Amino acid sequence: MSKDHWQLAKDPLESAQMYLKERGKTHNVSLMDLQPVDGTKVIAFQVDDFMRTWASNTQELAMDSTCALKISLLVSY
């Protein structure tokens, strides 16, 4: 895929958010609302078809092991 298709802004995070807002449904991906901690930037998304398939077998999912803030999400399907 050409850079012209996925690079929608100079800032990589902003570009990814724009891409997912515009084309996420095409790829079964949706943005999640996760507020950043002061001094950080956040993008959170889920792969919808994967979540539908595995949600009944999953009690908890962890996010971003590189973040100092430990966050867990309960699956609500």
Image: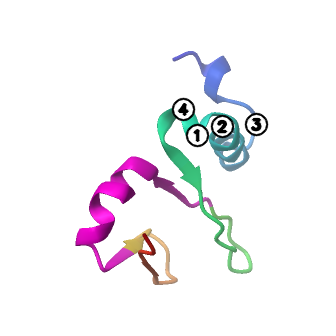
Nearest the viewer among 77 and 75 is: 77
Mark positioned earlier in the residue sequence (4 or 2)? 2
Residue type pointed to by label 3: Lys
Taking the spot 68% from the left edge, 74% from the top edge, the residue there is 36
Q: Which mark is residue 10?
A: 3
The residues tagged by marks 1 and 2 sit, at their Cα atoms, a distance apart of 7 Å
Query: Is disc 1 surrounded by few (<14), some (14 to 19) or many (20+) residues within 10 Å?
Result: some
Camera-near label (2 vs 3) is 2
Mark positioned earlier in the residue sequence (2 or 3)? 3
Q: Which mark is residue 24?
A: 1
**What SS does tag 4 mark?**
helix
Instruction: Report the span colored magenta.
Output: 43-61
The residues tagged by marks 4 and 2 sit, at their Cα atoms, a distance apart of 11 Å
The residues tagged by marks 1 and 3 sit, at their Cα atoms, a distance apart of 19 Å
In the displayed structure, does residue 44 sit left or right of residue 19?
left
Mark positioned earlier in the residue sequence (3 or 4)? 3
